[in-house]
Each structure stands twice: as structure tokens, then as C-alpha cells.
Image (tube, rainbow, N blue to C red):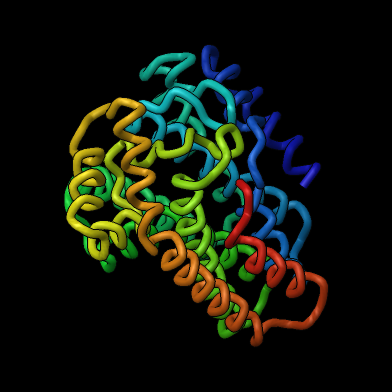
């Protein structure tokens, strides 16, 4: 991962004039680097070549960073991971251009590898990310059914987790059944990860998450805990939560009342239970894979997703 960090700096350094600083800040802003870690672990269950492995691991983190920049443009987000977002610091035009450059760099790296399976996995994930973001935006502030929510997060979050695992398995020259097992693991992990983020939006610690507590609710994003609260809460709960969702930039007292209304229901425990079910499915999917350190670490990653601090 140290080598990947160095490559991320190199990518920012060769950006067009005017984009070097925002690209460097976005690529080195921290984060878990979970997607490249998944790719490397999946690949090392087989026999990958080092150079393509480093290139692919770097490419998936670049792609992820590009999506974050564009998400912040759509959401008009002011901060992420305790720092000003690219759009807040440099403006919409520069932020969009930086995200576009990073998308291009990601696929440039994949073209260098020359494996069409990787290009297919990443392009499908990128298309899913775009479609998922658009559908979530269209569904904001309105009623959302659980199945619609699940489809959104399959595209927007789980798709890149799945692609990371599939790309790694392909680079490691694993058999198709084992690559399919990694794909199932990645998708289940991604679903659990997003559900955990949804919980932390309501109960997380300010400064530890990418955005402030209640940011999704304030933006009108209908997450799984909110869906459960609207379905199962009493009339007063439903009224308060709907007022928050329907109010652009809700005042702090209204947002706090909305969070408290959700927390007064079983929405958080139900969401965590669902996420744990996805974690169990992810771990079960590892049974077809070779025993060893990589499998153990993948299992540990899945076990840590629910209940994490950030």
C-alpha cells in the first residue's frame, strides 16, 4: 500500500496545470484505502504479477476518489474527512475537471494492463456509480421502498467493492468459481459497509466521518434507518422525519429533532441486524477460496464493518 500511495502522488503530479493541487489533495486526503486493499488481497490468493497489481490497485483508488469529488459537487458538500471538499475550495468547474481527469487516469492505468476483464469490471462499476447517484438524487426527499434503496447501494457502493475483488481475482489467475466467490463477497461487504455508513450518519462522531452527523438526512437522502423509521414510527415520528426530508437546509433544531425521532424507533438496530446478515453472507462466500492469510484478513475486514467508528 505504500507503493500505491507513491503512485497516487505521481498521478496528481502529471495532472494538467491548475488541477495538480486539487488532485493531490483529493488523492492524499486519507481514507481507508479499502478498495485497493481488497484488490491486492484477492489477487494474492493466486499468483499475480507485481506491476499490473500495483497499477490496478492504484486505479481503483483513483476511480473511487473521482466519484467522491463528483458526489460532493452534486451534494454541494462543504467538508469531507475534516477538510474542505474540492468543490468548496476550488469551485465547481475545477472540481468537475479534477474528477474527470481522475476518471481518465483510472482507465488509462487499466489500458496499460491490457486485460479486458479488468476494464469490463471497472466500467460496469463506474456506470453503476453514475446511475446509482442519479437515482438516489431523484429519490431524495420522497418515499423510498427498501428494494429501491438496496438497488441504489448495489450500484453506488457495492459495485466498486465487487469490481475490486473481481479485478484482483483475475490478476491472480484464479478460477472462475473463485472469482465468482470473490464477487459475492465484495457485493455483500459493500452493502454492509453502506448500511453501516447510514447508521453512522445518525449516531457517528462529528469529525470522524466524511460529513457531519445527520448530513444525509439534512440533504434529503432516504437511508435504510430512515425508511424503517417512516414505516414503523408513530405519527409524531413520521411527521418530524418528513419535515426534515422536505426542508432544504433544515435548521439545526429541526435536524436534531429528526435524528432523535429516528433514534427513538428500532430503525438503528434493524439496520445493524441487516448489515450483520450481509457480513455473514460475505464471510460465507469465502469458503470456496484458498485458506491462508489473505482469506483471514478478508474475513476480519467483513467482521469489522458493522459497529466501526468511521
Q: In the rendered image, which quarter is residue 284 located in?
A: bottom right
* Left or right of 206 on screen, residue 148: left
Q: Going 29% across and 50% down the picture, which residue do you hit?
A: 222
Q: Going 63% across and 70% down the picture, which residue do you hit?
A: 169
Q: Going 38% across and 55% down the picture, which residue do you hit?
A: 264
Position in image of residue 200 (x %, y %) = 50, 49
Q: Going 37% across and 19% down the picture, which residue do you hit?
A: 92
* Left or right of 251 on screen, residue 122: right
Residue 172 in view, yes or no: no
Q: In the rendered image, which quarter is residue 270 located in?
A: bottom left
Residue 150 in view, yes or no: yes
Q: How many marks?
A: 0
Position in image of residue 36 (x %, y %) = 65, 52
Q: Is residue 268 or residue 5 the one in the foreground?
A: 268
Q: Is residue 81 or residue 151 the one in the foreground?
A: 81
Position in image of residue 198 (x %, y %) = 44, 52
Position in image of residue 14 (x %, y %) = 62, 24
Q: Is residue 268 or residue 108 the one in the foreground?
A: 268
Q: In the rendered image, which quarter is residue 271 located in?
A: bottom left
Question: In the rendered image of this protein, does residue 183 appear above or below residue 50?
Answer: below
Question: In the rendered image of this protein, does residue 116 appear above or below residue 18?
Answer: below
* Left or right of 176 on screen, residue 69: left
Q: Is residue 214 or residue 99 the one in the foreground?
A: 214
Amino acid at each position: 500500500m505504500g507503493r500505491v500511495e507513491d503512485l497516487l502522488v505521481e498521478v496528481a503530479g502529471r495532472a494538467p496545470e491548475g488541477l495538480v493541487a486539487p488532485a493531490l489533495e483529493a488523492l492524499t486526503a486519507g481514507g481507508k484505502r479499502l478498495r485497493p486493499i481488497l484488490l491486492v488481497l484477492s489477487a494474492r490468493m493466486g499468483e499475480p504479477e507485481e506491476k499490473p497489481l500495483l497499477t490496478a490497485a492504484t486505479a481503483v483508488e483513483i476511480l473511487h476518489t473521482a466519484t467522491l469529488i463528483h458526489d460532493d459537487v452534486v451534494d454541494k458538500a462543504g467538508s469531507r474527512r475534516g477538510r474542505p471538499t474540492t468543490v468548496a475550495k476550488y469551485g465547481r468547474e475545477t472540481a468537475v475537471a479534477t474528477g474527470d481527469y481522475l476518471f481518465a487516469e483510472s482507465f488509462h492505468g487499466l489500458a496499460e494492463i491490457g486485460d479486458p476483464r479488468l476494464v469490463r469490471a471497472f466500467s460496469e462499476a463506474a456506470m453503476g456509480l453514475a446511475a446509482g447517484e442519479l437515482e438516489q438524487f431523484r429519490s431524495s426527499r420522497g418515499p423510498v421502498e427498501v428494494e429501491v434503496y438496496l438497488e441504489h447501494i448495489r450500484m453506488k457502493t457495492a459495485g466498486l467493492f465487487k469490481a475490486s475483488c473481481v479485478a484482483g481475482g483475475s490478476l491472480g489467475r484464479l478460477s472462475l468459481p473463485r472469482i465468482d466467490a470473490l464477487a459475492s463477497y465484495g457485493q455483500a461487504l459493500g452493502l454492509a459497509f453502506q448500511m453501516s455508513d447510514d447508521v453512522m450518519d445518525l449516531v457517528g462522531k462529528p469529525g470522524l466521518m466524511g460529513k457531519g452527523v445527520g448530513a444525509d438526512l439534512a440533504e434529503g437522502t432516504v437511508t435504510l434507518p430512515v425508511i424503517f423509521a417512516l414505516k414503523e414510527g408513530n405519527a409524531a415520528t413520521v411527521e418530524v422525519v418528513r419535515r426534515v426530508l422536505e426542508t432544504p437546509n433544515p435548521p439545526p433544531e429541526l435536524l436534531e429533532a429528526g435524528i432523535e425521532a429516528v433514534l427513538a424507533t428500532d430503525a438503528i438496530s434493524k439496520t445493524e441486524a441487516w448489515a450483520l446478515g450481509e457480513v455473514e453472507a460475505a464471510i460465507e462466500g469465502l469458503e470456496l477460496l484458498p485458506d491462508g492469510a489473505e482469506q483471514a484478513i478478508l474475513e476480519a475486514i467483513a467482521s469489522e464493518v458493522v459497529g466501526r467508528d468511521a
